Amino acid sequence: MLAAALRAAPDLYDHAQGQRVVLASPGTLLAMLRATALAWQQDALTTHARELLQLGADLHRRLSTLGRHAAAMGAALRRSVETYNQLVGTLETRVMVTARRMHELDLAEGAPPVLQPVTTAPRPLTSPELLAAELDELTPSRDVLDEEEHSPGGTSSTGRSA
């Protein structure tokens, strides 16, 4: 069809180029449209992949922040429990002894109150990702292990003193 049009009007090709128009046969046009559609699909996939990568990076950063907060909260809970245990120790060994003695001597009305122990404990972290920082602190580095192995009085790889 394009060939017939060019035979009928030989200057058609030059005129089309001057107007920035590409002449194409129906088969060529269909192939160009399919190639364009495929390029658009690939562009859309690339855009979605970039968005997904950004969301993944954001999620990872937020999980890291959440992990740090959980670790800080755990440390604060640990300190609170230690302080509570000190309080209970003082209460039981110092204060309650005196309160019972005052009751025995009829210096106080009523017996000292019965205190209930705290039975609720926080759930421990078990996820390796969340424990990584704690494990890093507890695990000696390879350099420290090598130093200990080669220092006087250190142990060799066989477990015997050097």
Image: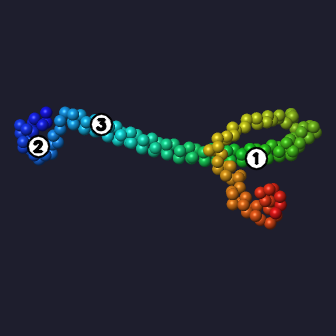
Q: Position of residue 84 (x, y in %)?
A: 76, 44
Labelled disc at residue 37 = 3
Q: Position of residue 36 (x, y in %)?
A: 28, 39
Q: Quadrant of residue 95?
A: top right
Residue carrying label 2:
13
Q: Is residue 100 left or right of residue 120?
A: right
Labelled disc at residue 82 = 1
Q: Amino acid at mark 1?
A: Glu
Residue shown at the point (73%, 63%) measured from the top left:
147
Going from N to C along the chain, the mark reached first, 3 or 1, is 3
Residue at the farthest bottom position:
152
Q: Position of residue 137 (x, y in %)?
A: 68, 53
Q: Quadrant of residue 152?
A: bottom right
Q: Amino acid at mark 2?
A: Tyr
Labelled disc at residue 64 = none
Assess whether mark 3 and mark 2 are in contact (beta carbons under 8 angstroms): no
Q: Amino acid at mark 3?
A: Ala
Residue shown at the point (62%, 44%) measured from the top left:
129
Q: Position of residue 33 (x, y in %)?
A: 25, 36
Nearest to the eye among marks 3 and 1: give it.
Answer: 3
